[in-house]
Image (tube, helix red, strand yellow):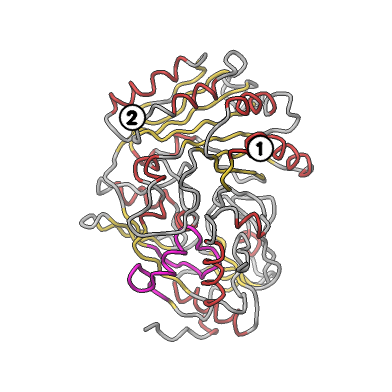
Amino acid sequence: MSARPPSVGAMTTAMLPADPGFDDVLTGFQRAGRHRPDRVVVARSADDVRAAVVHAAAHRLPVAVQSGGHGQGRLLDGGVLISTRELTGVRVDPATRTARLAAGASWQHVIDAAAEHGLAPLSGSAPGVGAVSYTLGGGVGLLARRHGFAADHVRRIDLVTADGALREVTASSDPELFTVLRGGGAGLGVVVAMEIDLVEVTTILGGGLHLDLRAAPDVLEGWRRWTTTVPEEMTSAVAMLVVPDLPVVPADLRGRHVAQVQLAWSGDPAEGRRVLAPLRRLGPVLRDTVREIPYTESASVFDEPDRPHAYRSENRLLRELDPAALAGITRAAGPSAGTMCVVGIRHLGGALARPPATPNVVGHRDAAYSLMVLSPIEDDLDAVVDLHRRLIAPFLPAALGRSLNFSYGALTPAEVREAFDPGVADRIAAVAAALDPAGLLRANQPMPRPA
């Protein structure tokens, strides 16, 4: 039975707009917009979270949560924002190969703690991202084709629901809630901790091959053909962009139209080198960073920017990649695009296509690839949105849906529904309505009401 919720007076970590540091707490990785709450609770315990929810319910105030993810959708206007940035604890049990992580822990926190025991989590390409929010959305990481989605390997979720109760949610304690939390968990409560599986990985063969698209415009098609031949130990992606001609950029990449093939091999290194060898023949290699690395350095595989900035994206999950569409996007997103754009394509399949031992609601497991187009934004958001729609359009005949984890910007309820298999969005919405009939909790992306 859950303990009695703490009193509102216990909410000693609450901050008001006039308090020093209030604006700093609101500033996250995504700078395109920020929440505008009446009160922020910087939670340092589950009791802080419960007190914040109780206070909000008593005053009929909306509640949102800010963690450490890259995404940002619906913004809170008024109400209570719960920040989990201080909840970063990680505890590893090497005997069971599990980790218990608090709500604000980043993947790097988990990676470092697990590495001490020769273990690793199913973390993503940017280890600075919050592990909990990533996992609730599914989670496609560096070991994904071998081990599946991060959501497939959750054992327990500690959840504060809209009534202020702290629930320990497992497959046996509450099967339906446990199912819909993993893959569709936003808005069902405030997660304060999660227990996950770890895998026996200490090193990987990983890094990137930067190829010159001006000299070899068919790199994307060559990578697509190569992905049809590789075993599950190989998880890969390709990012295509025009590298800015700036002094801070390495001279060998500056100003070039580049395809960065990103590789993570979790098998025998010698075999991995043989598997990736054909990629080096796709065109001139401007830079080659592939090497054996400890998993603690996994951020170097995708080498993504770690500086907060404003950006928007559009994405689709695809059953296949059309060669003509690949050729078209190589041209359209290149130097003539007029707006800076990064095209990212990830190879899925393998273990991602198989159902987990304990069912969850991660959608579109039959997708073979994911496609995302992303642009930094300053003033001309309309130009970015228009470019993204034009770049995605040729791929729509093969689209199965979209990924919430790669949706950087607000979606409509109908677009959120596209992230799930038929009937699943209604199932999640029904659980949300039972747990939070007043609609107190505001998810990052609005879950549609049952049809």
Where, quadrant-wise, is the C terminus in this rendering? bottom right
Identify residue type, mark 1. Ile
Q: Which residue is mark 2?
A: 292
Where, quadrant-wise, is the N terminus in this rendering? bottom left
Say above or below: 275 vs 362.
Answer: above
Question: Where, by quadrant of the figure, is residue 323 drawn?
Answer: top right
Say above or below: 146 vs 445.
Answer: above
x%, y% of residue 105? Answer: 44, 57
Magenta stretch, residue numbers: 167-194
x%, y% of residue 400? Answer: 56, 45
Residue most toward the left? 95
Which of the two residues, 222 or 424, is positioned nearer the viewer here?
424
- Determine the CA span between mark 1 and mark 2: 35 Å
Q: Residue 392 bears which disc, if any? A: 1
Eye-nearest disc, 1 or 2: 1
Secondary-structure class at tag 1: helix
Crowding around mark 1 (Cα neighbors within 10 Å: few <14, some 14 to 19, many 20+) is: some
Identify residue type, mark 2. Glu
Which of the two residues, 262 or 327, is positioned nearer the viewer here?
327
Question: Where, by quadrant of the figure, is residue 200 drawn?
Answer: top left
Secondary-structure class at tag 2: strand
Crowding around mark 2 (Cα neighbors within 10 Å: few <14, some 14 to 19, many 20+) is: some
Name which of mark 1 and mark 2 comes first in the sequence.
Answer: 2
x%, y% of residue 192? Answer: 44, 67
